[in-house]
Amino acid sequence: MQMVYLNLVLVQNQTYPLVLTFGLTDPVGAIGIQADLAAFAGMGCHGLSVITAISIGDTTGIEDVQAMDPDWIADQARVLLEDMPVSAFKVGYTGGVETIAVIAEIVSDYPEVPLVLDPFSTALADSDVDEEILIALRELLIPQTTLLILSVDELSKLAETWRDPSDESMLEIDVMHLIQQGCEYIMVTGTPAEKQEVTNTLFSVDGIIHTNSKTRLAGVFVGAGNTISAGVAATLANGITTPEAVIEAEEYTAAALSHAQRLGMGKLIPDRFFWARDVSLKS
């Protein structure tokens, strides 16, 4: 009885949404779990985390990744979900097929909770993904996904798990195929645009519903995509619709990139707490 009472008190005292992210650890905090937690906090949420892998790296890039045992991943998530009400999921780096299966089983128990899937990262030393992993993502996780985020090239590689390679533009056909499998929205980054611009396109069952183009910033960055996906998850957790969440996350990411810092000798890191530093400078 006392434990039930304590749980009720904790729920009543909760003043901001909880977002649970699955991903790898990044010692720099540019991508993965650490970056997600910063973005969640920057957008008014509290982040919970399930570690899928541990990485070694610095600001120049990730050198190596050690996957977690799938049973440990399941235990991390189940213990958290039995204790706290989660308002959104974000799934980043998954690693192997067994991990994808474990995560898919977990999130399937919470169909009302929005899921942002951002499984690819160019920050990894080897960004090529095995076909078995692509198939597992396509069959197990993508049908449960509220918003899938991937680049034009990543979409093309994923599509080759159900069709032959093509020299023709198959972007919209491939997107609609995934939406017909159950994915609600798909954001494709790096869609055709001028070289000096960065363009993202959001699709739903109705086709293109939002396109955002911004002037490409000078410098080499790491963590831009991670910031967008975490930002969308946090905004969805606050009860915003997916199209509106995407717009807010893009604006947040643009500001974080414009305040990016060179912490080491490598790439620029988004400042996910730019707003706090702006306020402190004015006060």
Image: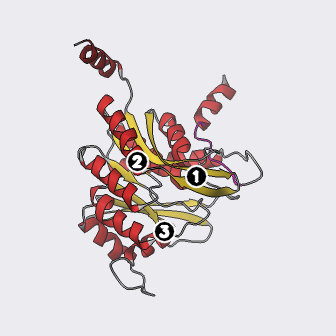
- Near-viewer residue (192 or 82): 82
Q: State the SS at label 2.
A: strand
The answer to whether residue 119 of the structure is visible from this angle is yes
**Tag 3 and tag 1, C-beta contact below 8 Å:** no
Pointer 3: what residue? 129
The residue carrying pointer 1 sits among few (fewer than 14), some (14 to 19) or many (20 or more) residues within 10 Å by Cα, namely: many
Q: Is residue 35 left or right of residue 161?
A: right
At which x and y percent is residue 38? 54, 38
Label whose residue precedes the other's in the sequence (2 or 1): 2
Q: Residue at x 70, y 45 (%)?
A: 261
Taking depth in this image into account, of 69 and 189 the one nearest to the observer is 69
Say which residue appears at 45% left-offset and 35% top-offset: 47
Way the structure is coloured: secondary structure
Sequence-first tag of 3 and 1: 3
Q: Position of residue 272 (x, y in %)?
A: 58, 40
Marks 2 and 1 in Cβ contact (< 8 Å):
no
For marks 3 and 2, the one nearer the N-term is 2
Q: CA distance from mark 2 to mark 1?
A: 15 Å
Q: Decide whether residue 257 is among the magenta residues.
A: no
Q: Is residue 34 left or right of residue 104?
A: right
**Residue at the disc numbered 2:** 90
Q: Foreground residue, 46 or 109?
A: 109
Q: Disc 2 marks which amino acid? A: Lys
- x and y percentages locating residue 266 in the rendered image: 73, 54
Q: Residue furthest right?
A: 265
Residue occupying image coordinates x 62% and y 67%: 196
* Image quadrant occupied by the N terminus: top left
Residue 206 visible within the image: no
Which residue, given by chain and number where applicable, does mark 1 sit on?
223
Q: Which residues are magenta?
A: 267-273
Can you name the residue that lies furthest to the top here?
Answer: 2
